[in-house]
């Protein structure tokens, strides 16, 4: 089996997943897709903390727990599709990278719900946590990577080849076609660092 890794960039209720393998220092995109991890039947599921802010604290906690379980189930289903697709092509997923924002710890739920900026921050963490938990259930190792540190991480892992590799990832859209957004580019780079770490540890 060939090795593959996943890069995930999450938003409110959805995310971009990119699966890559490496051929030397060149990144090969095996799969790219939008994954949706919210149930449209649940009111406010795309912005769970915004919705929870209108509830009592006890009800908010219950609501967020319910929505987290739902998002995790949907994330597992989405990942299983990717696992099956890559397995049919003789690729085994050896790890995943989830892109983070600031990575700062959040305060208590009551303080989050009282602050609109913290509500947005918490929602970002909410959907990243759902994917993280889903990877854990599928025994896919997870690495959290801060987006702003990604280029420096690539340079430390790939050395002199990093600049050319970054240019190669940026221009992949011309060969594989759209969509090839910033989410796809950072997801591909993050996934490639997982493979590079694995190669260095062997």
Image: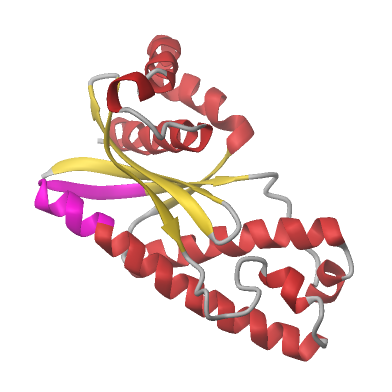
Q: Position of residue 61 (x, y in %)?
A: 71, 84
Q: Position of residue 53 (x, y in %)?
A: 80, 76
- Residue at (24, 57) in percent of width and height: 83
Locate residue 27: give its quadrant.
top left
For image coordinates 54% across by 24% down, the residue present is: 151
> Which quadrant would residue 31 be assigned to in this image?
top left
Of 165 and 95, which appears nearest the observer? Answer: 165
Q: Quadrant of residue 137?
A: bottom left
The residue at 78%/74% (across/down) is 109
Query: Number of numbered discs present?
Result: 0
Residue 202: horizontal and vertical position, in percent? 24, 35
Q: Quadrant of the N terminus?
A: top left
**Residue 71 x/y as whole percent:** 49, 71
For residue 156, above or below residue 128: above
Using the image, determine if residue 122 lies above or below residue 24. below
Taking the spot 36% from the left edge, 33% from the top edge, the residue there is 192
Left or right: where 170 falls relative to 54: left
Is residue 87 one of those drawn in magenta?
Answer: yes
**Colour mode?**
secondary structure
Asked whether, in this view, residue 124 is left or right of residue 154, the answer is right
* Residue 175 versus residue 128 in the image, above or below: above
Q: Is residue 195 left or right of residue 13?
A: left
- The range drawn in magenta is 82-95
Q: Is residue 74 magenta?
A: no
The one nearer the camera, 50 or 139, is 50
Pick whichever, 45 or 107, lies toward us. Answer: 45
């Amino acid at each position: 089996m060939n090795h593959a890794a996943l890069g995930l960039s999450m938003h409110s209720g959805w995310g971009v997943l990119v699966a890559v393998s490496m051929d030397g220092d060149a990144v090969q995109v095996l799969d790219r897709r939008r994954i949706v991890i919210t149930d449209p039947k649940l009111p406010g599921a795309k912005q769970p903390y915004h919705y929870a802010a209108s509830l009592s604290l006890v009800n908010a906690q219950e609501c967020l727990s319910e929505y987290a379980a739902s998002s995790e189930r949907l994330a597992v289903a989405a990942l299983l599709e990717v696992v099956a697709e890559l397995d049919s092509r003789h690729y085994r997923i050896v790890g995943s990278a989830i892109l983070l924002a600031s990575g700062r710890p959040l305060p208590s739920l009551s303080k989050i719900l009282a602050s609109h900026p913290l509500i947005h921050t918490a929602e970002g963490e909410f959907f990243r946590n759902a994917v993280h938990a889903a990877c854990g259930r599928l025994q896919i190792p997870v690495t959290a990577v801060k987006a702003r540190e990604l280029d420096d991480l690539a340079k430390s892992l790939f050395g002199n080849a990093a600049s050319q590799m970054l240019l190669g990832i940026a221009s992949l859209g011309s060969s594989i076609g759209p969509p090839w957004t910033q989410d796809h580019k950072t997801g591909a780079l993050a996934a490639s660092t997982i493979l590079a770490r694995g190669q260095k540890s062997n």
